[in-house]
Amino acid sequence: MIRYLLRRIAAVVLILWAVSSMTFFVTLKLGDPIATLLGPRASARDREHVRRYYGLDQPTVVQYGRYMGRLVRGDLGMSYRYRRPVASLIAERFPRTLLLAVMSIVLEVTVGVALGALAAARRKTKLDSAIMAGSFLTMSMPTFITGKLFLLFIAYYAGLFPIGGYGVTALDHVYHAILPASAIALLSAAYYARLTRNELVEILQSDYIRTARAKGLSEPVIVLRHALRNALLPIVTSLGLSFGALFTGAIVTEAIFAWPGIGRLAYESISGLDVPVIVGCVIFGSVGIQAGNLIADLAYAFLDPRIRHA
Amino acid sequence: MRSILSPRLSRWFLLVLVFVTQFACKEPYTAPRFEGAGSATPVRGGTFRFAFDTDLRTLDPAQAYDELSTAVVRHLFDGLVDYDPTTGEVVPQLAERFEQAADGLSYTFYLRANLRFSDGTILDAHAVARSLERMLDPRKVPCPGTSFYHLLEGADDFAEGRAPHVRGIVVRDARTLVMRLTQRDQTFLNAMAMPFAAPVPTAYAARVGNDHFARNPIGAGPFVLEAWESGSRVVLRRNPNYWDPSRPYLDRIVVELSLARHLQFMRFQRGDMDHATNYTLNTADYLMMTEQRAWRPYLKREPDIAMYGLSMNVEVTPFQNVHLRRAVAFAIDRDSIARSRNYRIVPLGGLYPPGLPGYDAHLPGAHTYDLARARTEMRLAGYPDGYPNEIELWLTEGDAAVMYGQLIQADLRRIGIRIRLRFASFPVYLDTTQRRRAVAMSFAGWNMDFPDPSNFIDTLFHSRNISDEHAQNQSFYANPALDALLDRARIEPNRARRIAMYQEAERMLVTDAPWAFLFASTRIEVEQPYVHRGASSPVYPHEFRNTWLDLPRRPFTGNVSPR
């Protein structure tokens, strides 16, 4: 297991190096960060002063070398735009995105698994059809549609929730996060509902369930205590994968709801060609995805002894 | 046919459908929600809220050049001079008075007595001098505006590290500061009114570091920073030690950051925000506001000192040909462009927009829509049957740019010029259009740093602003006669003669047509009925030092007459 872990960590380091290098060079090709930072009104002389201040008058290779040197020491550099360490910017935004991610995961798993279990238990009934049709509909609606609909109907018309933003106190943050988290969760809940239903339908036809029925156990006990536990295995794995992806996928939701998390930071840095922040966000996203994958693999091995032995 | 839903589910489905339809068909905010208490005199107190769709970069006045940073910085820092809200002239602010020497080469500023920064530090002539040197030192802060001050004697030596101080900044006594220039410059006072020149407590900035200072600033403005939550909001609180005890009226200003325009407008309609502008209102919102009688009195339109047009690169084929440039200038129907934007823009035939000194509503030779003239110019250019090759027009991305591009494309097709639209992100657009011989034609604009024609014409058309990369003169137009006229105008002390010289320079431009001047923008603002804006800066529109709220606000009846 330790050798496996070391191999995975080495692969992660290699991937991070490749991703950060690629992002660094691609971003520099998109335009001049200083011209973007200062806009068209700054004179050529002032642009040169500022370029020198940031060390961008050096050849690209030198800039890359310096950047990688800092990166190896765990320093993500300074933002051109905000003149703050990238690590502190990410550290400030991370809890906000984490709050959104945790709330949306709790919502999507709770709602998705409950609906999936209900559909499986009432298989081939109108309720099953309605849940599956509903999940198909919501799976087909991207977050930028559901998000705007939520804002329009629930926040603006009904006035039940704030119109975007982050709020001031801790409780206020949670209140502000309900709509964006629901918009993210709607899409994934539908996926989990379908996944749970399919798994449960298969499991409910297996021999040990038939035995349980023969013993006279009630249907809710059979579904909840015996079948659902086994059906959760693929859900746990896909949860690990989607958790990492949530950090990178938050760009759209955070932009729609003006949620000041990592996604919003990445979006604004890309528009402003703030190279250190862009690379920092990409590294952060990659770490998130890699960690998610690793946790999913380990969880799978932990939950299924056949994989552990293999 | 049987329903796939049970009767119970069908009832639920029907209920939800009715609920949604009810909301979808209802426009909840056809009138303001609140109005003022009816006070005739300014009331102190209250929190004023507005929003931007970008994040705040910096609160260091030496670095603030984008609109949002400038807007917030202007509340935290005062300068030696500022603009009079009614006349637009430069008037004293932290300085009690100032005078220009007879030879025009030096300015003396006399500071008010007992000035202090908000932390209690003394603000005297020494503090102002140190603050200016901090801004002019490229090793200390990356100031994007040092060029405005390069005529200060010794500024270049200081910037290059050849002198420990700027020779031209002389402290005569604690309240008197003299600034000497290497040559006369009639825009120097305008430069001194820019936030770059605002005094900062340099000892504090040096102690905490410039990066920390940019997030935790201390100034001598009407407000102090209470909180700044990155990407979310910035809160300003009244400065209790402000030198002018009559200002500000507001207790607090809250600026919501990175709030998308559609969210800003929703909040404004719901009464959660006090102020909205062009940046808040999209076309549909603007039309809705103009059509609703209750909102109409609170909608204001003012000239925005900004100009837009087509820049034609005179170094690139086919725009070396002046007749072809003129043909383009006379082929574009500016009225149809204004119509497409619901007249939120004003057709423009010359460089200077309305509101800028030097603007001439009857400019001889102004670029107007004149198809016959355009066709004649095409013949003179040697292309009576149209230009044979396709020309690429560069624009930045955005809905408005798409509309402008398509209208220009259709207009130029009528005189036989085929245009291919090339949309680019802002960084790519800047990088390419300001590079020498890279782009034939681009859609461009300019908004003022200060209300003086030199800020438009010098920047965009003086040959000194041509460089191989990042050229502000992006049509690469070089005319020695124009350069000489602009150099004379810049130092001309007589205002009327100076303006006349700039008008003559504008006439040279419309004749040579390195740009086809298209339109000026207007500034649209709407405020809640209980907001009394007060006199606002003619240069910095997001300023609320004279604003007061008629509190307590009450449910809107329409009985309190609009201001």
Image (tube, helix red, strand yellow):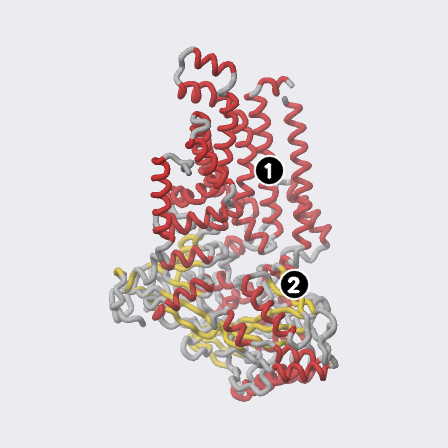
- Residue A262 against residue B138 in the figure, above or below: above
| Quarter containing the C terminus of chain B | bottom left
Residue B547 placed where, x, y %? 35, 67
Which of the 4 quarters of the picture holds residue A81? bottom right
Q: Chain of mark 2?
A: B
- SS of the residue at dot 1? helix
Q: Nearer the viewer, mark 1 or mark 2?
A: 2
- Residue A106 against residue B127 in the figure, above or below: above
Residue B65 placed where, x, y %? 53, 64
Picture disc at residue B325 = none
Q: Chain of mark 1?
A: A
Residue B52 placement, left or right of B380: left
Residue under pointer 2: B422
Within-10-Å neighbours for mark 2: few <14, some 14–19, many 20+:
some
Q: Is residue B491 visible?
A: no
Residue B95 placed where, x, y %? 44, 73
Q: Is residue B72 visible?
A: yes
- Residue B316 against residue B13 in the figure, above or below: below
Give the residue drawn at x 49%, y 20%: A204
Residue B443 placed where, x, y %? 61, 69
- Residue A84 against residue B186 in the figure, above or below: above
| Label pair 1/2, CB-CB below 8 angstroms | no
Q: CA distance from mark 1 to mark 2?
A: 37 Å
Residue under pointer 1: A287
Residue B490 placement, left or right of B121: right
Residue B89 placement, left or right of B517: left
Q: Amino acid at mark 1?
A: Val
Which of the 4 quarters of the picture holds residue B152? bottom right
**Front one among B251 and B374:** B374
Give the residue drawn at x 35%, y 39%: B12
